[in-house]
Amino acid sequence: MKKSNFLFFMMLFNLICLIASCKSEDHQEKSTTKTKQESKSKKAPISPNEILAFYNSQPTAQKDKINIVPESLELNITMANSALLSLLGENGRFIYLTNSQFTLSDTVSYNILRHSGSLYAMIDYELKYGAGKNANDLLRGLDYLKTCCVHEAEMGALAVWSLSGKESGISEDQVKLGGTGLGLLALLYGEKLRPGYTSKHVLYSLGDFILYMQKKEGGFYSKYFPDERARYDKWTSLYYPGEAALALIELYKYSGKTRYLDGAHKALTFLANKRLNQRNVEADHWALLATKEIFTLQSKEHGRNQKDFELLLGHAIQICHSIIQQLGKNSFAAGTSVTPIATRLEGVQAALLILPKEEKYSGFRNELQEYVDDGINFLINAQIKNGSSKGAFCKKSGLNGLPPDKIK
């Protein structure tokens, strides 16, 4: 058997979106669907209202649906989590590479962002399904994060460092906004698992560093170089702002300190205004996750400012529309890469939870639900069901009866 490279961050994204799918409404045997591709003879919709009208105007068709049973899906989720746990070493680092000769490696392009993101997903699983039985293993992963990479950065604030001696591809020590965001997110989820495991000082200090990286208009510097004591924005990341916003929201929920919620709202508002009326926007699933969380908070605690609500909801609609249009009708064909599908599914499911129930959203809602149902079925087909890598996901999915571990 040829060497198989099972990158665990792929399992992370699949685990997250599989967990999210169990929260969605019951799936029906039949659903009304719309055609996914915009007519080439018409100008593509730009505004949220145009997007909603587009989906409501499409001809309907009856499509047989695979009934996804939540109880059965839970088994897939558990298998994915078990596969991730099997790759968590005694030193708290994840094993990146396995093959049929059982050679293991945790040094292939190690990345502290993937480390933190994986723990975030796995602790989320443990809180929902695990009853704490794997808590010690997960806390060992958090210990590695704290001892390896949480260090002082600017004005006494702490940050998650990407170290040249710890990560390949890093030529000098640096702080990535997304690294501190995901690190903070993982540590905050660790507090749900074992309260007090990380001090409030550490958590607040990480949040304050994120705020230090935020610009006046709401955007962020992407990196900080400690040796130069300089913030850097010549290189930008699509995902860092959403990751940072989500971490700030979770820190607000933990602390009640409004500066963190204000920073998150400012970040999401900046992204929404930046992309306003753009015909195509990036598939920013982290922004969708953060938007879902801030909407939930607003409805529970403060009520909603209608103007802000419409702006952020419109932004979510734009992202989801672009996801459907960019991937197109061949999204779930055999040989399609798994990770982009999984990350997008994660965001679309978050958007479904905040989409209003009014009739004008019905066509769009049906389209998103069809996308989720087909996508979850795609992931199930991509999951390895037997052998030493049971529960892991292949880099590319095989459909129509082709074993996913035979797809290259």
Image: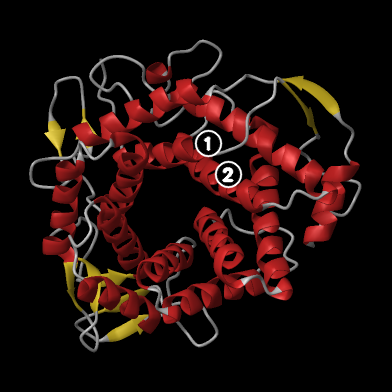
User: Which of the 4 image quadrants contains residue 144?
Assistant: bottom left
Kindly tell me whether residue 239 is visible in this rendering: yes
Q: Where is residue 377 in the image (x, y as percent from the top left)?
A: 55, 25
First in residue order: circle 1 vs circle 2: 1
Q: Name the residue under label 2.
A: 349
Q: Does the residue at mark 1 contact the one at mark 2 (Cβ under 8 Å)?
A: yes
Question: Left of 392 or right of it: where is 43?
Answer: right
Relative image position of residue 145 (x, y in whole percent): 18, 58
Q: What element does badge 2 sit on?
A: helix
Q: Which amino acid does label 1 sit on?
A: Ser
The residue located at (23%, 63%) in the rendering is 170
Q: Which residue is drawn at 84% across and 26% down?
A: 61
Q: Is residue 185 left or right of residue 246?
A: left
Measured as percent of width and height from the top left, residue 379 is found at 49, 28
Q: Is mark 1 on a helix, strand or loop?
A: helix
Q: Residues within 10 Å of mark 1 (few under 14, many from 20)?
A: many
**Residue at x 70% of width, y 50% of height:** 321
Q: In this view, does 220 lie to the left or right of 88?
A: right
Q: Quadrant of the N terminus?
A: top left
Checking the image for residue 21, the label placed there is: 1
Q: Nearer the viewer, residue 121 or 253?
A: 253
